Image (cartoon, rainbow, N blue to C red):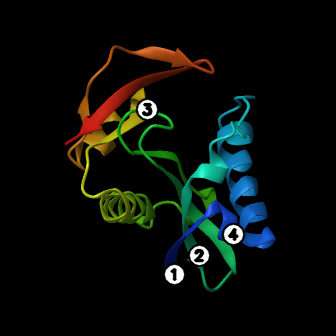
Amino acid sequence: MNIHWYYKHFRNLTTTELYQILQLRCEVFIVEQNCPFQDLDGKDYKCHHLMGFDRATQQIVAYTRLVPPGISYEEASIGRVVTSPSARKAGLGKELMQTSITIVQELYGGMPIKIGAQLYLKGFYESFGFEVCSEIYLEDGIEHIEMYRA
């Protein structure tokens, strides 16, 4: 899979990029996970958005929202981590997360990163140096934990 990684602040997204981002988030977080929730939470316009663009299909197939400090947490954050079902099993999730961490460190000066993670992905995030820093909590009916990376 030939992926082009790039990121933009919300104000610089094209309408096509924004549409594809929202379509991917809806496909996975709402439809696939059968979890009706308010995805548009007022944070997007304050963030950078990392996109993995498949040159063959002309579609965004991997994505994260890079959240500045003081929006979700005191620390910077990475959220809405998602890969398209059509692009899974190609190692994109690992590449997406490592690229996200690198960009967050560039944008926010190497400060710690805090995330809210679905519990079943705990091991995945631990492989990037995140450590659990909260009890399990329910968010939209799904078990989550907060994790911290110094």
**Do labels 2 and 3 touch, CB within 8 Å?**
no
Where is 55 relative to 41, above or below? below
Mark 1, residues whose alpha carbon is within 10 Å: few (<14), some, or many (≥20)? Answer: few
Q: Which residue is mark 4?
A: 13
State the separation of the CA atoms marked 2 and 3: 25 Å
Q: In screen coordinates, is 110 left or right of 59? A: left
Q: Reading the chain from its start, which is encountered first: label 2 or label 4?
A: 4
For numbered disc 2, what is the local secondary structure?
A: strand
Q: Nearer the viewer, mark 4 or mark 3?
A: 4
Real-space CA distance between mark 2 and mark 4, rounded to the nearest whole angstrom: 13 Å
Q: Could you classify mark 3 by the number of other residues whose Cα lies within 10 Å: few (under 14), some (14-19), or many (20 or more)?
A: many
Left or right: where 102 falls relative to 10 = left
Q: Marks 2/1: CA distance?
A: 5 Å
Number of numbered discs visible in the structure rendering: 4
The percent coordinates of residue 77 (x first, y second) are 41, 44
Query: Reading the chain from its start, which is encountered first: label 4 or label 3?
Result: 4
Residue corresponding to mark 3: 116
User: Which residue was labeled with disc 1?
Assistant: 4
Inspect the image, locate mark 1, and give the three-letter code of the amino acid beneath it. Answer: His
Q: Which residue is mark 2?
A: 53
Q: Helix, strand, or loop for circle 4?
A: loop
**Mark pair 3, 1: CA separation:** 26 Å
Residue 12 rendering spot, x and y as whole percentages: 67, 71
Q: Amino acid at mark 3?
A: Gly
Q: Residue 148: where, in percent of width, then height?
A: 27, 35
Sequence-wise, which precedes: disc 1 or disc 4?
Answer: 1
Pinpoint residue 132: horizontal percent, then vertical percent: 26, 27
With 36 as the anchor, is 6 left or right in this view?
A: left
Q: Find residue 48 and report its image quarter.
A: bottom right
